[in-house]
Image (cartoon, helix red, strand yellow):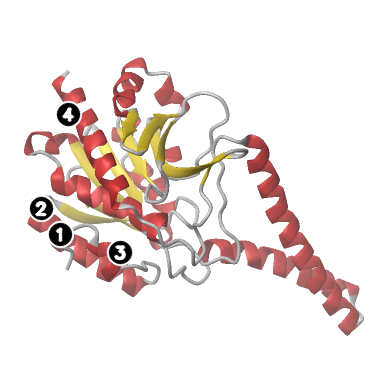
Amino acid sequence: MITKPMDVLEQFPIRKSKKQKQAFRDAVAEYAKVQGYEYRVEKGSMGSQNVILGDPEKAKYLVTAHYDTPASLFIPNFITPCNFLVFLLYQIAIVALFMVAAFVMGFTFGIITRSPELGGSIAGLVYWGMLIVMMVGPANKNNANDNTSGVVSVLEMARSMPENLRNRVCFVLFDLEEAGLVGSSSFRKTHKKTTEHQIILNLDCVGDGDEIVMFPTKKFIKNDQMMTNLCRCVGHYGDKSIAVKAKGFRYYPSDQAKFPYGVGIAAFNRGKVIGLYCSRIHTNKDTILEETNVNILRAALTSMIGADTAE
């Protein structure tokens, strides 16, 4: 049973198998009941099951996060959201690594079997197999940041949301983000008309880093009123900070991309040369979830929603 959001880290650290996900959803159902929210599970494509607290048809804001656990990889999903050169070089390096591994395996089998054709087939299987494992392979046992941090933040906001604002906000936990944004795609399809105008605040990997950055979609940026309200969150919170990235290269792959007015929210560390980066996710080093970040986001986003309502 989840009595406080941080319990998720201890009680439901892995949400990959059907059994693990169902146990987590059952606990969230009880949590939602205690907190006074309408709860339901909405089924989508590829067996995805999105968890909904509140009424998505009446809310102006959707506060979201994906709850599925990523696959465990031998290399991290290294993200530099504002450095195009490093981003590009890393993607090239990953592809090159996969191609080299596939070539070595294919060449070896070709030599052993004296069949170049078989070697080529093996190389293709190895390459595509590695790509599949990246998305649906064995669960990463440590996923404090990706994305237990987002789940905890959503549940914490639901818990602390003032009564007078609850009819303006719906909380959604997407399934199968790691398989290609499947849950959010299904949600968007089901609620096509409503989500044309809703503001989606998507929390993904917010637990590790002192710099929290918001990445609004292009359509969001063009709406002056929305941008003005979003920028209310900007500022320093002790040693932490929140910023909005609206210009230059900015790339953060997550569920907000499926919605016209989506905002991706994540936390980063900073390097002197590469700038903002996220470096531990999808590996066994993903063990950091700073509760301070959760509390900062809860306060900043709730205040922003309240100010928007007041106006």
Horizontal and vertical percent position of residue 137: 53, 69
Say which element carries label 2: helix
Task: First in sequence, mark 4 or 3: give its number.
Answer: 3
Horizontal and vertical percent position of residue 143: 41, 62
Q: Is residue 232 above or below residue 188?
A: above
Q: Nearer the viewer, mark 4 or mark 3?
A: 3
Work out how far the residue at label 1 is from the one at label 2, CA to CA, in angstroms: 6 Å
Task: First in sequence, mark 4 or 2: give its number.
Answer: 2
Say which element carries label 4: helix
Horizontal and vertical percent position of residue 279: 53, 52
Work out how far the residue at label 2 is from the one at label 3, CA to CA, in angstroms: 19 Å
Work out how far the residue at label 4 is from the one at label 3, CA to CA, in angstroms: 29 Å
Which dot marks residue 31? 1
Q: Nearer the viewer, mark 2 or mark 3?
A: 3
The three-letter code of the residue at mark 2 reads Gln
Residue 146 visible? The answer is yes
Which dot marks residue 138? none
- The residue drawn where x is 84% and y is 73% is 119
Q: Is residue 309 above or below residue 278?
A: above
Say which residue label 3 marks: 9
Residue 58 visible? The answer is no
The furthest residue to the bottom: 112
Work out how far the residue at label 1 is from the one at label 3, CA to CA, in angstroms: 15 Å
Which dot marks residue 35? 2
Say which element carries label 3: helix
- The residue drawn where x is 32% and y is 46% is 293
